[in-house]
């Protein structure tokens, strides 16, 4: 009988918990508001941890960047737009740190960057693209440090760098030209 009472009590108590709400209240504060401050401890508004959205607006008043903040920490999906209304970027935050995928686009709609984060540090594959959509750079990171295959391409598609980084040591061909004459 005791195990049954314990299980019922656990279910009852679990049901009383409020679900975690990762959506800040719809309070918009402009980035230039003097009462909004970014400190080492997080975002403060009127001296208190901020809950809402820090926004940047264009000359026409349209929101161009929206950063969600809960308890003074960046939390959730941050979004940005070009003046023309097209999506500029999306990035995710968890507990004040970048987490997951950060994507930015060129004005023509092609991807500009695709970066991946874990705990605020670059992690895994990262890509940079030319405006025409061709790959410019491909990097690999582990805990914020270059790690693994690294490659770069010129605008014409020619591979200009192809090397690996392991234990902070570089192996391969970087492809940069020396500014010194041959023999130096």
Image: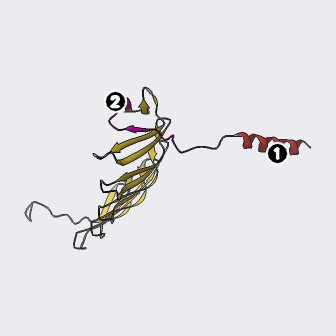
Give percent across and percent down for residue 48: 46, 28
Q: Which of the 4 image quadrants contains residue 113? A: bottom left
Q: Which residues are magenta?
A: 23-36
Q: Residues within 10 Å of mark 2 (few under 14, many from 20)?
A: few
Q: Residue at left 48%, top 36%?
A: 51
At label 1, counting other C-alpha atoms closer than 10 Å, the crowd grade (few under 14, some 14-19, many 20 or more) is few
The outermost residue toward the right is 1
Left or right for 56, reference 180: right
Q: Residue at x 48, y 44 (%)?
A: 75
Inter-mark Cα distance, 2 to 1: 52 Å
Q: Which one is in front in this view, the residue at disc 2 or the one at disc 1?
A: 2
Indicate left or right for 123 with 84 as reference: right
All told, the count of numbered labels is 2
Under circle 1, the secondary element is: helix
Give the answer, above or below, for where 141 lies relative to 8: below
Earlier sequence position, callout 2 versus callout 1: 1
Question: What secondary structure is the magenta-colored segment mainly?
Answer: loop
Q: Which mark, residue 114?
A: none
Which quarter of the picture shows residue 124? bottom left
The residue where tag 1 is placed is 7
Residue at the spot of label 2: 34
Q: Residue at x 29, y 65 (%)?
A: 108
Colour mode of the rendering = secondary structure
- Residue 143 visible? The answer is no
Whether 38 is among the magenta residues is: no
Position of the N terminus by quadrant: top right
Q: Position of residue 34 (x, y in %)?
A: 34, 30
Residue furthest to the top: 47
172 sits to left or right of 77: left
């Amino acid at each position: 009988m005791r195990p049954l009472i314990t299980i019922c009590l656990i279910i009852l108590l679990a049901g009383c918990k409020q679900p975690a709400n990762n959506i800040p209240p719809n309070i918009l504060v402009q980035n230039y508001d003097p009462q909004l401050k970014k400190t080492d401890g997080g975002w403060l508004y009127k001296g208190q941890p901020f809950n809402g959205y820090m926004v940047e607006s264009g000359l026409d008043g349209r929101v161009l960047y929206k950063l969600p903040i809960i308890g003074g920490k960046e939390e959730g999906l941050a979004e940005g737009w070009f003046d023309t209304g097209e999506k500029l970027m999306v990035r995710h935050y968890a507990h004040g740190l970048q987490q997951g995928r950060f994507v930015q686009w060129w004005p023509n709609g092609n991807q500009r960057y695709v970066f991946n984060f874990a705990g605020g540090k670059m992690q895994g594959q990262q890509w940079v693209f030319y405006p025409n959509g061709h790959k410019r750079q491909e990097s690999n990171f582990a805990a914020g440090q270059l790690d693994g295959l690294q490659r770069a391409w010129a605008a014409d598609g020619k591979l200009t760098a192809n090397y690996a980084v392991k234990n902070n040591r570089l192996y391969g061909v970087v492809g940069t030209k020396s500014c010194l004459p041959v023999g130096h």
